[in-house]
Amino acid sequence: MDLTYQTIEHLAPLVRKKKISPVELLDAILARIDALNPRLNAYITVAADAARADAQRAENEIRRGRWRGPLHGIPISLKDNIATKGLRTTAGSKILAGNIPDEDATVVRSLRRAGAVIVGKTNMHEFAYGVTTENPHFGATRNPWDTSRIPGGSSGGSAAALAAGMCFASVGTDTGGSIRIPASLCGIVGLKPTYGRVSVHGTVALSPTLDHVGPLARTVADTAIVLRAIAGRDPLDATTLALPPPRLPENLKKLPKRIRLGLPRDYYFDCLDDEVRSAVLQAVKHFEQRGADIVEVALPSLAASVEPSNHIALAEAAHYHHKMGWFPAHAAEYGEDVRKRMEMGPEVRAVDYLRAFEMQERVRAEFDCAFAMVDAILAPVTPVAAPQLGQKMLTLDSEEEPVRAALLRLCRPANLAGVPAISVPCGFTRAGLPIGLQLIGPRCGEEMVLRLALAYEQAHAWQAQHPDL
Amino acid sequence: MDLTYQTIEHLAPLVRKKKISPVELLDAILARIDALNPRLNAYITVAADAARADAQRAENEIRRGRWRGPLHGIPISLKDNIATKGLRTTAGSKILAGNIPDEDATVVRSLRRAGAVIVGKTNMHEFAYGVTTENPHFGATRNPWDTSRIPGGSSGGSAAALAAGMCFASVGTDTGGSIRIPASLCGIVGLKPTYGRVSVHGTVALSPTLDHVGPLARTVADTAIVLRAIAGRDPLDATTLALPPPRLPENLKKLPKRIRLGLPRDYYFDCLDDEVRSAVLQAVKHFEQRGADIVEVALPSLAASVEPSNHIALAEAAHYHHKMGWFPAHAAEYGEDVRKRMEMGPEVRAVDYLRAFEMQERVRAEFDCAFAMVDAILAPVTPVAAPQLGQKMLTLDSEEEPVRAALLRLCRPANLAGVPAISVPCGFTRAGLPIGLQLIGPRCGEEMVLRLALAYEQAHAWQAQHPDL
């Protein structure tokens, strides 16, 4: 059996029954990384020795009959802006190239408590401030489906590692789509939870108002397993919510009988690639055929919220980098695109920042109105499949648009509103590139989003296809 | 035809077609007030002359073909803590007994723009800080269904006036149930909208974090008509939301095919009078028989939120009364119960106030979780029908409880969470006292709540029954 493309859902009972050992799993993953990482550059740091010690400890515990749950002994990766005690955490930056944290981020502590084996730190767009993962210091990550293309970002290494069988799950961050964009472009699953559902303590901040930590995995079930391990109130992060942990996938398999799904009239279906549009509308039809009511929902302020969202991110990122003593002190050590944004940050006026929060309130209220009528909203994740490495612009409906703006635009509204949103594979282009379906839910509606995504996934075989590597 | 118990929905087309004149409507209402207000004491001030001038102006406009909409020429009342230019606004207090505002509250401006005729100012619990409307300065309002009983409060005058046919609609305020409690005890409809949906500018504040302005009427349709007139962004109230106005009742008559309604497992069904419990469960069964799925929802923090809610109200009320120079300067002019609360206010510690906001976040998240699964939650409004005037305690499930605490407890969670909640009549006790059903919806879900209430009301005839006066 080829272990590297197995799911956690499938492996966990085998690990529990000692039919597969955590050390064996880790060896398979490390061999896969040895074989493929030189081409794909998904990992910045592979922690082979520490991971082996962790896997051995997990194996011993399980042998003594102490199984901690479905992540016990499972090799996972972490985006490299999530602090790991004693393990280099670069945030994809030259400035932090030698940064070895004294402490684990809260999510890392939670994952270790669940028995997960941390196999390494994945490549990312520098400081998470971009969507291509063309990292100027550690090299570009390549999309496993076509290595001449970007994996998306900023959690591009996590998504590429999953698509190539180099880990079983990963944890990333999402400030404007950084989990969902690479999930969509690499054909895996990525969930941005409700704002405050998962602690951000111990992650390198980008824009605290919009920052979210969340899981990436190859299936919806595996995504739910990781979410359950990392969600919850954290005294070290005042924004976290005290809620019961989301349930495990076996408890999410029944769909409510009566479902109403929203199709956004505004914004999400403008300027799309035809193949993306038709794959997403096919998914809409699938839900309709299963008996869901499809209802139009209005989100009229989204187009006007693009610039305010940029203002929040620019101002907060500049403030944080200044406070940390990184910018302008080390301006020369930034890649060109992120340096340019750091220079733009201080130009955002306080009145624009305040206006942006008024816009945030308006967008939240519009989503609230929509979710008073529907269980979830269906939309594309990205308007196109993976662009080429180095590509700066793309053309949709004869409009030219920067790649960065195009990849962000359908993801950022959920960050502004703080509502959960998942990317699940919903097909391939004729060129064989993955397409993502976005399911956006109401605040704290992770379980509804996961249920719907699980039902969709089970009716399709997208996740059974893997890139030819 | 007896005009005074007609609905706005029925009257508006007749007014528009000049089959009924606004002056005729007003005369009927004024005659009814003359006949009944001495017994019921629902009005503090009747503005007969100003109302007649308004009704005449409406009649002239309509005769010239300028019909403003369904409130044009309709006599309505306002709770006496809502500022009316040139018309005494007492907030039920001795301190403000001679207060004549220079300016209308925003909702009054909106109502005048819609052509409504303001017939007078209704009695209330002093400063809105109580639930009995036993006003020490202007006398107790009596419940039209049994004049030995309270109408509830603090908007008790508005509810009694409606139940007795002394106006066609009213606007009140609700900080812990002050619209819904009297609606429930007087057998009419009262809606507390989403926090920020209706401007509070120009109302006498009680606790700005929890204060809401909203409509009372005899039917759900009339409630929707008034809500549409008063909802919306107000530059003078920074908490207001910019959302399209809720639709008129004719657009709310179709229920979505697939409805999921929540039955709270926690809190709302503890310590109820048996007749109240069985009337509410009968309503639940009604929705089930219409095809709705009834789902259990968890709101585990509500019991622990009672004290924090009190802390917010006590501290904010004391702060406001101090800032206005009312307390302690005029302590002797307060009724005993409100004075006691003003003395308790400064004893709330800042740490308790901050903890209360943490509890507010938790309760909001629990409601969010519930509303990710259901369209609305069904519950009683008050655990008992109207208590006697002067009654201080009541016994439920052999537990003694202050009347005040009992009437507040099922209403206040929606204030803390800021979610919309409506009270609609759902039957009578064997003694002939009205019972209220509460429908609680997600943030900005007024339309869903109104749709459900409208469907429920149309299937029953409770609103066709009137007290014997």
Image (cartoon, coloured by chain):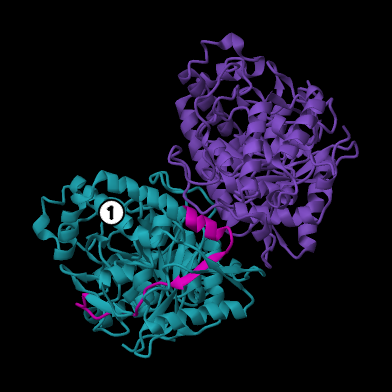
Chain colours: A purple, B cyan
Whole-percent x, y for residue A365 in the image: 53, 49
Residue on which disc 1 sits: B311
Of residue A47 and residue B1, the one placed in the foreground of this image is: A47
Choose top left, top right, bottom left or bottom right for residue A297. Answer: bottom right
Of residue A118 and residue A252, the one placed in the foreground of this image is: A118
Of residue B26 and residue B174, the one placed in the foreground of this image is: B174
Give the side of residue A45 with respect to residue A110, left or right: right
Asked whether residue A178 appears in the rendered view, the answer is no
Of residue A321 and residue B20, the one placed in the foreground of this image is: A321
Vertical relation: B391 (above or below) B61? below
Vertical relation: B458 (above or below) B423? below
Give, as a three-letter code, the residue at label 1. His
Q: Could you tell me which residue is drawn at 37 percent across and 90 percent down? A: B430
Whole-percent x, y for residue A454 in the image: 72, 54
Whole-percent x, y for residue A98 in the image: 58, 16
The secondary element bearing badge 1 is classed as helix
Give the side of residue B98 with respect to residue A337, left or right: left
Instruction: Classify 10 Å Cα crowding around label 1: few (below 14), some (14-19), many (20 and above).
Output: many
Asked whether residue A412 appears in the rendered view, the answer is yes
Residue A358 included in the magenta stretch of the image: no
Magenta span covers which residues?
B365-392
Vertical relation: A277 (above or below) A261? above
Residue B390 included in the magenta stretch of the image: yes
In this view, the residue farthest toward the front is A64
